[in-house]
Image (cartoon, helix red, strand yellow):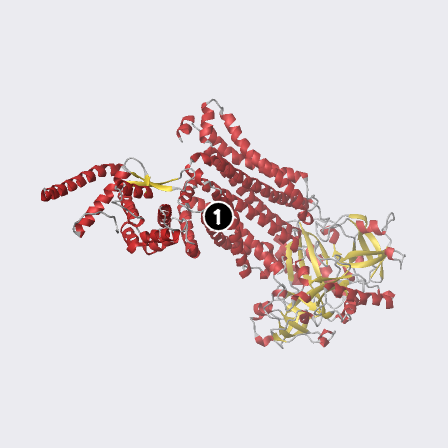
Amino acid sequence: MQYMAMQYNLSSIHHRELKKGSAELLVLSLVERQARHGYEICKLIEIRSEGELRFNVASLYPLLYRLEKRGWIKGRWVEKAGQRRRRYYRLTAEGRHVLPVQQRTWLAFVEAIRRITGVEHA
Amino acid sequence: MPDWKREIRTQLASLKLEATRQAEIIEELSQHLDDRFEELCGKGATEEEAKRRVLEELSGGGFLPRELRRIERPAGRESVVLGESRGNILGGFWQDLRYAARMLRKNPGFTAVAVLTLALGIGANTAIFSVVNSVLLRPLPFDQPGQLARLWEGAPGVEIRASGPTFVDWSEADTALENLAAYSPTALNLTGRSAPERLRGLRVSAEYLQVFRLNPALGRDFRPEEDQPGNDKVVILTYGFWQRSFGGAAGLVGRTIQLGGEARTVIGILPAEPVLLVEYEFLVPLALSGDAHARNPNDRWLRVVARLKPGVTFEQARTALSAVMENRVRTNPQSRVNVAMSVVPLDVQMTGEFRPKLWILFGAVGFLLLIACANVAGLLLARGTARQEEIAIRAALGAGRWRIGRQLLTESLLLSLFGGVIGTLLASWGTEALVHGIAIDLPRAAEIGLDSRALLFALATSLVTGVCFGLAPAWQAGRADLRGVIIKGAAASRATFVSRLRGGLIVTQVAVALILLTGAGLMVRSLWRLTTTSPGFDAKDTLGLSVSLDGTKYPDQERRVLFWDEVARRLESLPGVESVGMAGGLPLNEWNNTTIRVGERTGGSEAEQSVDYEYVGGSYFHTLRIPVLQGRVFGPGDNTPRSLRTAIVSASLARRAFPGNDVVGQRVTIFGENWEIVGVTGNVRQHGIDQGVRDCIYLPQAFSGVGSRRVMVRTKVPPLMLANTIRNEILALDPNQPVSNLRTLEQVVNGSFADRRLMLTLLGLFAGAALLLAAIGLYGVMAFAVLQRTREIGIRMALGAQRGDVLLQVMRQGLKLTVLGVVVGLSGSLALTRVLSHLLFEVAPRDPITFAGVAFLLMTVALFACWLPARRATKVDPMVALRCE
């Protein structure tokens, strides 16, 4: 469980690409509508995937920093009353262009898998 | 909650991230781990277990650093300063320093102004300190200098030189003194070489060098038997003279030279150091017992130095010596010695009159540094406001107050160190100028220079200065409200605080500048009074010169009188010469003092008067234009050795000694002889224009046993034009009589208040610099205030405010600060100008005219400094001002 726990069987190279692409997509999707901090993103992935997908501190933050570096998301320290300040990430204008492309690619990939696996089992 | 930061830092260590970036990541990750820890605990894990799992997730196989390395950039050469680990203070300091240097480089204008201001302050302080250090602080360059003392007749504070009998008495006080020596300055002609030369030297008793524990560098010291008449034809030369005139020839020792018309054997050469006798060329034995006036207890002409025995205090020495003198009076009531005496530490004696002056200068220059500090602090505060955003960002990124304060303090220190370096250069130049300005008037002037102590002082001053003016901006930054950074509105209260602080600095500057100006003003008034006070004689168009007769060629009074008469006759026949007078000394120089008895009232002490006396010849009174109030002046008939003894008294002596009586025809007893008073002349301030008039009596020079005379020549043309003619005329009379010390009496008069002039020059310079700095500071504050209020002013003008209203409003703000500063400064001046009182002449330390004058001057300058930015405020275009936010 170094990076994320996704339970499908692929060769290790494919596995890594897949994970990377899907993980980026997950994060971009989660900060599309509202700014979220790292732990929140982590928990949302875990909850919405019903425990199937999980990030930890060592895997999430390098990803966030890479996306930020590419200019797809932007982190900002925000202080709220009675709380410690936190770094909230939100989608940038560039990120908004990238997200649909990533989503389409991912859907195409899933569709391809479905078609293949569907034919085998049909 | 466990502290995750150290774990995270360990994980990130290999990445060598920029400090800012690392701090940011650590903060973010540790928050995440806190949340995760709470989550695990909430699910029923023990704290131990939760912590273990969290750390596992963090470290898992080194994934975090591996991934981050691909994304994050390692730290560049310079980084923005943020929080730092405690273990790396030195590294942090280095980082601060580089950052500070970069910030200063970025603002060359600001840096230049600040560094120059500080250089001025530190340089002036170091220069004055090097003088104070060399003259007052450094011990005299002798072995155990603390045991050296100068002895005087007269109660402490009344310094009267010792008579021969008194010196002999003191020599007997062997319980207190290790050595005792008497000396007296003399001047002798060196002949037998290409041209006659007038040399200055000291007649010293045999133990003179032993008192100072000095040994000749070559040859030997005087032997006791050489201090006797007949055996005294020996001489010790000073190192400087030996080098200058004999090229340092070692073979000179043992040879004879023609000094004062006699062959004297050179028995020794003094060492080059210490430079005690820098102004002299030779030492000869005093041979006191052969001196006629050495036996007269009323003739006080000997200077006496002594070395106290180890452990003996100055007071104990005084008690022991007084006891000896009282004993003498008891056993021999006719000895008439003065029982009062004083023992003064030699260093205090040498620097005595300069001590308060130097401390005053040191204080004044300290004030200048204070103003410089306040000025730079003001500049830094203004810049701090401009840098608010930068500081805010740093604070937002997690830099603590201490950390930001430290960074700002580092910048201040760097500024002050730069200022210190340039200041030290200024000081080395300034010290040189100071020494030349003071010339040889200042004791130990030859020792003045920038030594390690002065350099250390410059460094310490720089550091203290840096901390002092750096504290204000660092404090300002420390007060920065973190939220105020993000929420812009919170800046207002801070701005008020800063403007108050800057206002306080301006008040300080104005107040201190006013104190310095008052000091300088009082000195100006004193000097003006001095130059307009008559010394009792007319120094204009008069030339003074020294001629000293050889004892061998002119052994008796007859021959000397003939010579002087011939000098007067020849010089008076020169075209351009009006009259010629002679005396033992030029006016305003040292006069001899004696006790006279008045009329027939012998025995009673009330009939005795302590007076200055002078042997005069030629047309002395006419030449110096000293008015004759009664009787007559000396005629040719009075000035022969066989003449009746006649005397002329000053008006003050006439009034004191013969109240209500006709003075002319009265008799006085001096040196055991009766003298008839033939005239009364006007008072002369013979000890200095700033000194009170002292009673004085003039005697015909035919009765003087001394061959050395000062000749004064009143001319009808500018006196220096005749200098060579006069010199040649005297040489024509006797080619072996060198003429020396040629100068006009105006030079003598001006020289007599040279030290005041120097004090005035320095105080004036400091005050001028202070005024300038205060004006710049005030201008800066006002200009900044106007800039900050551009919008407000714009709105007011848009609403119909007249330019005059705006001008008045802005200026009112500046004037408020100035008036406050002036009030504080005037109270300070009232308290502080007291220390100047002994330097003032006919001006009270609280002279209202001076106080009002400087306050007016300062207000005028301040008005101008406020007017410039105020005028700019009236030029604000309301539309531009409104758009500027």
- Which of B356 and B99 lies nearest the eye of the viewer? B99
In this rendering, position of residue A24 left or right of residue B634: left
In this rendering, position of residue B281 left or right of residue A31: right
**Image label count:** 1
Letter of the chain that mark 1 sits on in the rendering: B
Residue A44: quadrant of the picture: top left
Residue B674 image point, x, y percent: 85, 60
Q: Secondary structure at mark 1?
A: helix
- Which of B882 and B273 lies nearest the eye of the viewer? B882
In this rendering, position of residue B352 left or right of residue B395: right
Q: Is residue B176 above or below residue B91?
A: below
Residue B335: quadrant of the picture: bottom right
Q: Is residue B139 above or below residue B653?
A: below
How crowded pointer 1 is (Cα within 10 Å; few <14, some 14-19, many 20+) is rated as: many
Residue B354 image point, x, y percent: 65, 55
Farthest front residue?
B44
Residue B819: quadrant of the picture: top right
Question: Could you tell me which quadrant the C terminus of chain B lies in?
Answer: top left
- Which of B793 and A74 lies nearest the eye of the viewer? A74
Q: Is residue B194 visible?
A: no
- Which of B415 and B684 lies nearest the eye of the viewer? B415
Residue B13 image point, x, y percent: 34, 55
Q: Is residue B62 visible?
A: yes
Residue at 50% from the left image edge and 39% from the top image edge: B498
Farthest top residue?
B800
Residue B187 image point, x, y percent: 67, 65
Q: Amino acid at mark 1?
A: Leu
Q: Which residue is mark 1?
A: B116
